[in-house]
Image (cartoon, helix red, strand yellow):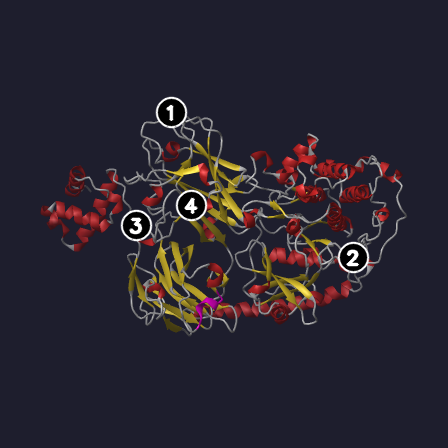
Amino acid sequence: MSYPHEKKLAKDYKASHSVDFTVLTQETILMKLINFHQNSMEILHPPNTGYVLFNLCCYLLLFNGINTSAYTVPDRYFINCGSSGSTTVYGRNFVGDVNPDSFTLSASHSKEDQSSDSASSPLYQTARIFRQKSSYDLDLVQNGIYVVRFHFYAFTSPDNLATARFDVSTSKFSLLSNFSVQNSSTSKSPVIKEFLIRIDVGKFQIYFTPSGSSSFAFVNAIEAFLAPDNFIQDSPSPSYITPAGSKGVYNGLLSNALQVVHRINVGGLTVTPDNDTLGRNWIPDDDYLVLRNAAMNTPFRSAPPNYQSGFATRFDAPDPVYNTAKELNIAPSQEGVTLPKTNFNVSWRFNVNGNAKFLVRVHFCDVISRAGSDTLKFNLYIYSNFSQKIDPQDSTTATMTAVPFYNDFVVDSDDSGFMNVSIGPRKDSSNQTAFLNGVEIMQLVNVPGPISNGSGSGNKHLPVIIGSVAGGVVLIIIAVVLSWFSLKLRKGKPVDALDWQLMDLNAGSSYSKSTDRNTNGSPLPDLNLGLKMPFGEILYATKNFDEKLIVGEGGFGKVYRGTLRDGTKVAVKRSEPGRTQGLPEFQTEIMVLSKIRHRHLVSLIGYCYERSEMVLVFEFMEKGTLRDHLYTPKEESGKSTSVSGLSWNRRLQLCIDAAKGLHYLHTGLGGSIIHRDVKSTNILLDEHYVAKVADFGISRLGPLDQSHVSTEVKGSFGYLDPEYFRCLQLTQKSDVYSFGVVLLEVLCARPAIDNLLPRQQVNLADWGMSCLMEGELHKIIDPLLVGKINSNSLSRYGETVEKCLKDCGVDRPNMADVLWDLEYALQLQHTAVPEQSHEGSNTDVSYNLPLPVIRRLPSHSIATSEDEIGSDANIERSSTNPSEVFSQLRMEDAR
């Protein structure tokens, strides 16, 4: 069928008007066309015909090269919580949730009106308060990606909204856990949490759950609307990047919810929701630049970007983002001619959760090149080991400039708490510069949410619930019977024969550990009944998880200082939804630590798995981590700074302690345990400066009949064994490599990775090996140690480091060798004995050294049987004189 009149209508208007159709809605375009051809009005009757013309005209405009979008922001759902009236904010009509007609509000609720801050946005003058678990039930009529935003503002109220602590979740995802406005904002300003969620047609429930009986939840406004088609795509799959630089593809992106962490307008000003196509906030990039002088803002481009079909649209980012950029700051010469630029990059550093997955979207629009100019190509870097060529013309298949496009990457963060994004020139580019327009960083959230409480449509699921309960009862009966038979068979069996198949030690993926939690009520097996603790005891010890008692935070969750009823000081690790460690790591830590006891391994006191809470309770290590005593991390001071007051003797003794713990893991049980995450933050110090190895969440039990275990790569960037990373074969020598990096940290008082240093010094292991090979180890030691280390002791220590960091695992010593060398380095520091030859595992020359009589010291470890803890459990710290430094070694292991 042809439409000659409609086609002529569109073409005539296009030929006679220079209008940027990309900024207009379909309705506006249609009205302009109608006004242009008044004599065409008769074809708009009946209304159905007008609808056909409306869609046809838009199609013809697209067909003739005018790029407009059929998408307009829907009018649902924009909710003004706690209000009976509607208010218009940044062009959106927010309807009150008192007596709503388009959604359902369940459970008890109350309204709070603000009276003291009338100058704030109308959205933030009312709030909905929940004293018990409640939900908003939204009816969705179209599948797709939905933008879901929550607005929180603690205005003046008798309830003191700032003290509220609560969870926000959906039927599939836990979005916010133990959330508090106080922890999310440093000033009295609104807090907006935004998520992108793939939702199917039907009822979409948003739950608000107070964290405790004395707490409550609140929300000021909610937005939930359908995003444009292909707003987030998982086909083709985005590139998958690890901190070590490896690249693959990430499948199943849309099975996760995405929480917006950063949305940055690079080179531009703040973009408020009033000026954004989807009501977003974009903030300037200046505070994230590592070196501000390395980049400069480009002049604002006043003309609209050249949007092209099939590439970025103004819904991906608004015009102010694509019309501004930062480029390399190339200084002009005295004559005003641009100087040849030296090879440097511009870097931005963003704070992110450690060991998590993020969707990183980088926006580009070439607003610095002129049409017909030489091709501009440059590199994009994520962290320091991954780079990708960016070619604007190749990316957009367009010869014109200022064509917006973006690249998506799924990125694993390391444990530093930061993510670096950089741009830099390429040698094959005639224009030696680079630019960036915008960055979005969104964390992948894949933690199951709660089961529906029956509100709304819950009754239709009653048979399923009854069936599930009945099935669970049957399973419990079977489990009891099996447990009875198992106990009969295991009577008298030692602890170290426990069945390690209770859990999957391989669970999780590369770098980012599994976050799956058993929140649906499935019982966790009683991995060790003697260690199980009631949740009430945990609440007592931590004063209901008082924020003032937080002493740290990691991939599992927050760590609290606590005191049990008997006065025992403990460290309490509480799992949090959305973190990178979950049930597999929880089980692993229990299984490993319930089987071992050693003076130089942090002891597990108990665990709890109730109310969907996963909690581990450890002995409290008063002096914190080894890293705390070596240097101030760059995230706290802007650069890594040596702060250590530890003498060389003390540092050596701490290394010896940690080596003993690792040596016991490798040899003290019937099967070898490989720690897999040895680093300075996993070595803790007690009040007497006794070092102990901690965090066994990703440990592996190595088979006795194999030299290695094939497994996915896990660990911390900067400490990873390169052979393990290449071949996916984990051995005890992988721990030795990581420990070698720790030895360098102790000597140099700097982190394993420091992106602020010159390129050759960024990686401590590479830099240290280079200095060792050149005989310049003395140049990289901590300035606080200069002149305080015996040269023979430093030489022995350096040889130990060099052997630990060998590229091939077979060339590295075992932990017994490392322990021997460290003890010997300590003896050399104490005495004037000349250094003697010691070749590790290749010779037995060490047996010729004049060693003191071997004896054992009494253990302060928890009293257990010799069968339970292994024959090396009673190893003690040498607290006598230097001549006894070898007294703790099992000589049959010494090399």
For disc 2, the neighbor class at 10 Å (few under 14, some 14 to 19, many from 20) is many
Spatial CA span between label 3 and label 2 = 66 Å
Closer to the N terminus: mark 4 or mark 2?
4
Spatial CA span between label 1 and label 2 = 77 Å
Which label sits in the foreground, 4 or 3?
A: 4
Answer yes or no: do the residues labelled 1 and 2 have beta carbons within 8 Å? Answer: no
Type of amino acid at the residue the image marks with label 2: Ile
Which label sits in the foreground, 1 or 2?
A: 1
Spatial CA span between label 4 and label 2 = 54 Å
Which label sits in the foreground, 3 or 1?
A: 1
Closer to the N terminus: mark 3 or mark 2?
3
Q: Which residue is mark 2?
A: 869
Spatial CA span between label 4 and label 3 = 29 Å
**Is 19 placed left or right of 743 in the picture?**
left
- Quick one: 857 or 868, which is closer to the camera? 857
Answer yes or no: do the residues labelled 3 and 2 have beta carbons within 8 Å? Answer: no
Could you say whether the residue bearing mark 1 is in a helix, strand or loop?
loop
For disc 4, the neighbor class at 10 Å (few under 14, some 14 to 19, many from 20) is many
In the image, the segment drawn in magenta is 159-166
Closer to the N terminus: mark 4 or mark 1?
4
Residue 71: mark: 3
Is residue 375 placed above or below 229 in the rendered structure?
A: above
Q: Quadrant of residue 152?
A: bottom left
Q: Which residue is mark 4?
A: 285
Q: Position of residue 385 (x, y in %)?
A: 54, 37
Q: Position of residue 734 (x, y in %)?
A: 68, 43
Q: Which residue is mark 1?
A: 335
